[in-house]
Image: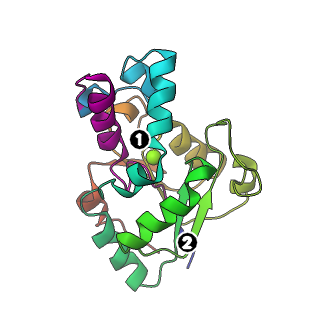
């Protein structure tokens, strides 16, 4: 069976919720989940460059990563897929510096997975290319399904890799329309019914 690609942030980890809490704590600013309409968090949180850099630094600390909640239903559905023999590939665009903390988080929450891959999805500075693979390398891989929240990655997977994509509905990805190999799902419960092959 072909593996299933599963993104990490805001697919299995409640990342934006953690960012909202950090922004409140560090800057005294209240922003709601529905206000995060741009994948660029500097824009969504209306931060100055220095505030954004501070947020980015705090959010990547191991203790902040380990404290992130799990998205409702994610473990249940991934476990049922894994129990049926579908290999799970966690494919994240997180900074390579989060490698150990990310694996620890997956273990802490008993997320079933067969491989853990960091991809330089967003050309972020500070990526260690001994750890992260490129988008070009990713495009040589084959998945039966990809679960994403990023509109840009969903488009890349569906268009450039011809991979069926399940896009989890988020305020920051509403501009992308469904098409035959890219479908929007409201949450993991909704995705549970996806017919795997
Ligand atoms: Mg994500």
Q: Is residue 111 visible?
A: no
Check disc 2 and report the residue beneath it. Answer: 3
Q: Residues within 10 Å of mark 1 (few under 14, many from 20)?
A: few
The answer to which image quadrant residue 100 occupies is: bottom right
Q: Position of 118 compared to 184: left or right?
A: right
144 versus 164 height, above or below: below
Tag of residue 21: none
As displayed, is residue 87 above or below residue 45?
Answer: below
User: Is 186 part of what is drawn in magenta?
Assistant: no
Q: State the CA–CA distance, disc 2 to disc 1.
A: 22 Å
Q: Is residue 17 magenta?
A: yes
- Neighbour tally class for label 2: few under 14, some 14-19, many 20 plus, Cα within 10 Å: many
Q: Nearer the viewer, mark 2 or mark 1?
A: 2
Q: Residue at x 22, y 24 (%)?
A: 30
Q: Quadrant of the N terminus?
A: bottom right
Horizontally, residue 36 falls left or right of residue 147, namely left
Question: In the structure shown, which secondary structural element does the residue marked by tag 2 occupy?
Answer: loop
Helix, strand or loop status at disc 1? loop
The quarter holding residue 3 reads: bottom right
Q: Position of residue 67 (x, y in %)?
A: 33, 55
The image shows residue 145 at horizontal and vertical percentages of: 50, 62
**What residue appears at the point 69 percent right and 54 percent down from the top-left corner?**
132
- For the residue pair 140 and 178, the one nearer the viewer reads as 140
Q: Which stretch is magenta?
A: 5-32
What residue is at 58 percent from the left and 49 percent from the top? 157
Query: Nearer the N terminus, badge 2 or badge 1?
Result: 2
Query: As drawn, is 48 to the left or to the right of 45?
Result: right
> Which corner quadrant of the image does residue 84 belong to?
bottom left
Residue 3 visible from this viewpoint: yes
Which residue is at a point 29% across and 55% down the rendered structure image?
A: 69
Q: Which residue is mark 1?
A: 178
Disc 1 Cβ-to-ligand 1 distance below 8 Å: no
């Amino acid at each position: 069976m072909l593996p299933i690609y599963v993104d990490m942030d805001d697919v299995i980890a409640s990342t934006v919720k953690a960012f909202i809490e950090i922004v409140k704590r560090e800057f005294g600013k209240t922003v709601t989940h529905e206000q995060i309409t741009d994948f660029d968090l500097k824009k969504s949180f209306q931060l100055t460059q220095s505030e954004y850099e501070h947020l980015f630094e705090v959010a990547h600390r191991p203790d902040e990563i380990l404290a992130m909640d799990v998205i409702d239903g994610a473990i249940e559905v991934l476990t049922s897929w894994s129990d049926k023999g579908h290999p799970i590939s966690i494919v994240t665009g997180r900074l390579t510096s989060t490698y150990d903390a990310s694996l620890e988080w997956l273990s802490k929450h008993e997320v079933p997975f067969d491989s853990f891959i960091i991809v330089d999805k967003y050309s972020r500075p500070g990526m260690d290319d001994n750890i992260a693979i490129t988008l070009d390398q990713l495009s040589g891989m084959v998945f039966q399904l990809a679960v994403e929240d990023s509109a840009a990655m969903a488009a890349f997977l569906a268009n450039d890799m011809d991979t069926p994509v399940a896009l989890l509905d988020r305020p920051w990805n509403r501009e992308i329309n469904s098409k035959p190999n890219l479908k929007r799902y409201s949450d993991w419960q909704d995705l549970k019914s996806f017919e795997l092959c």
